[in-house]
Image (cartoon, rainbow, N blue to C red):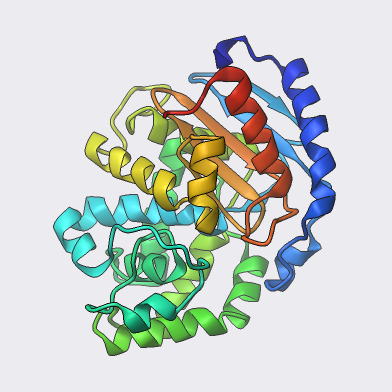
Amino acid sequence: MIDFLDDEILNDMVLEAKKYTKYGVVADYIPALGEANPETLSIAIYRGNKNYVAAGNIREKFTLQSISKVIILAVALMDHGEEYVFSRVGMEPTGDPFNSIAKLETNIPSKPLNPMINAGALAVTNMIIGESTAEKLGRILSLIHEMTGNTEITYCERVAKSELETAFLNRSLCYFMKQHGVVRGEVEELLDLYTKQCAIEVDCYDLAKLGYVIANEGKNPVTDRQIIPLHITRILKTFMVTCGMYNSSGEFAIKVGIPSKSGVSGSIMCSVPHGVGIGIYGPSLDDRGNSVAGMKLLEGLSSRYNLSIF
C-alpha cells in the first residue's frame, strides 16, 4: 500500500525516473513554456489532512495547461447538468492528437468527441456562466481555491499572453465550431478565457490536492464538505482514464491504471480512487505531449504499490 511510502523511497524513485528526461523536449511551441528546465522532476502525494510525501522542488510553480480541462468540465456540469453539456461535447476517446481538427470535419453532428481534447475543452469553456471573462475565470479559480485551500492561486499573465498570441489552431477550432453552432459568442473572448485558465499557476502540492478531491468523491480534505457532487467526480475520473493522457491514454491505462490528466507544461494530476492525490511536474515531454520522466515515475509507483484500478 502507498501508506508505507516515505520521502526517502520516493526520492530514490524520482532520481531513477529523472534519467528519462533526456528522451524528451519542452513544449516550445508556446514560447513561455519553452523556458522550463527539461531536467526538472518533482512529485507530491497527498493522503488527506496534512499527510503527504514529496520529492524534488514541489513548490516550483508551473501552469495547469490541459489539466484545467478537468476543472472546467466540473464547473460546466455543475452549471448546466449532463444533458446540456454532452449535447455539445461527446464522451468518446480519440486516437488523434489533442489539437486535431480532423474529427470535427468528419463527425455528424460536428461536435468534439470529448472534453479532454482542445476542441472539446473550448466548447466546455464556452459554457461557463458569467457576464465577463473576469467573472468566469473567478468562478474557476474559486473552485480551485476551495479544492486546494490556497486562495493565492491565480493565472500567469505572461504565459496566457504567450498562448493567446500563438493560438492559431485553437482559433481555427473555435471558428469551425461556431459555424456549426457548437460554440456561441465572440471567439476572441472565448480564447482569452481559455488561455487564462490554461495559465493558472500551481505547484505539485496544489496539484496533488486537486487530484485528492476528485479521488475523494468531491469532498474537502479538511472539512469533508462536498465541493463537487459525487456523480460529477465519477464522470471526471472516467474521462481521465479514457482520454486524460492524450493519445497515450490506452497504453497508460495498461501500464499505470490511475485516473490521470496531463498538461504540456509537463504536469500530471492523478486521482487514486478513495483518497490519494498525486501531482507531478516534469517539463521534458514525449512526442504525444506527456512528461517522459513523470510517466516512468508513475509506472514505478503503480507497479510497486499496486495502484492500478484495473
Quadrant location of the N terminus in the rendered image: top right
**Residue at 46% across, 42% down:** 145
Quadrant location of the C terminus in the rendered image: top left
Q: Residue 250: percent from the left, percent from the top?
A: 48, 48
- Would residue 141 be found to the left or right of residue 305 on screen? left
Image height check: is 281 above or below 90? above
Foreground residue among 106 and 62: 106
Work out which residue is located at the far top of the displayed protein and give it: 4
Q: Residue 81: percent from the left, percent from the top?
A: 18, 54
Q: Residue 225: percent from the left, percent from the top?
A: 30, 27
**Residue at 71% across, 56% down:** 285
Image height check: is 125 above or below 101? above
**Residue at 45% across, 38% down:** 259
Q: Is residue 89 visible?
A: yes
- Would residue 90 be found to the left or right of residue 191 on screen? left
Q: Is residue 150 visible?
A: no
**Residue at 54% across, 43% down:** 252
Q: Residue 115: percent from the left, percent from the top?
A: 37, 60
- Would residue 149 be found to the left or right of residue 238 on screen? right
Image height check: is 252 above or below 99? above
**Disc count in the image?**
0
